[in-house]
Amino acid sequence: MFQGLFHNVTEIEKNAAVEGIIQHATPRHDFFLMLVLSVSMASFGVLLNNSVILVGSMLIAPLLYPLLSLALGVIVTDERLVTNSTYTIVKSIVYALIAGFIIGFFFSSHDSTIVFPFGVAGESLSLLYALVAVVAGFAAAFAVTKPHLNETLPGVAISVALVPPLAAAGVALSIFDWTVFSNSMALFLVNIICVVFSAMVVFAMFRFSVKKTVAKEVIREEEKIIKKEDEKAPAA
């Protein structure tokens, strides 16, 4: 039964999964806009200590896809995909910290009265957080491969804390709270490592390693689209 879970996917569905992952992880301008908006929302959620706002910010965050793209790049051994995914993740972190810093600088009280929501500032970093990220990465990679499970991805995005720790780190940076900043970044790094690792396991079990040609073709098409967008930008 367990083996059947990873063998009842057609090659067409696998190709579609590869295409979808890479398309959603491509560092377009709209990707970073959605990231900044989600981190901004999360930053206000941190300042208000409001878990509902934090959940909403995770629903619109696109950060899960670059992690899946990185895992896919390792499995198909495509250097360009790994490089592009890493670039997207690093640039996302920079943008997220800047957004959190700006909101924290202008809207926080600039003192120690800020109460960071429990679980987003890494104050209780433990093995359980890593296990949650492992399960979430497994679920995300599995769901993105199965067309009928794609609607579960928003729930997976909520289960693993990616945006809230970045928002907390940015806000902490604005008030020079280095303890919260370092703890939040540690939680974020643990989460991305565990998500990528478990996603790699899933992609390996689905035998995505033979999809390197498909991945290369999708990457070429996405780079053409980005190039066209950049050429149109000055004229706009």
Image: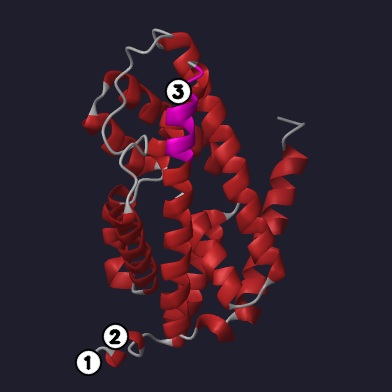
Mark closest to the chain's N terminus, 3 or 1: 1
For the point 28% across and 51% down, the residue is 159
Q: From the viewer's perspective, tell me whether residue 159 is left or right of residue 68.
A: left
Q: Which residue is mark 2?
A: 5
Q: From the viewer's perspective, tell me whether residue 57 is left or right of residue 172.
A: left
Q: Main secondary structure of the magenta part?
A: helix
- Give the magenta-colored segment's residue range: 176-185
For label 3, the SS is helix
Q: Which residue is mark 1?
A: 1
Q: From the viewer's perspective, tell me whether residue 70 is left or right of residue 110.
A: right
Front label number (3 vs 1): 3
Q: Where is the C terminus found, in terms of image quarters?
A: top right
For the point 48% across and 63% down, the residue is 196
Vertical side of 177 occupied by 213: above or below: below
Q: Residues within 10 Å of mark 2 (few under 14, many from 20)?
A: few
Q: Is residue 68 magenta?
A: no
Report how far apart the C-alphas of labels 3 and 2 lie in the structure. Answer: 43 Å
Quarter occupied by residue 125: top left
Spot occupied by residue 57 in the image (x, y as percentages of width and height): 34, 36
Q: Where is the N terminus found, in terms of image quarters?
A: bottom left
Spot occupied by residue 75 in the image (x, y as percentages of width and height): 56, 77
For the point 32% across and 12% down, the residue is 113
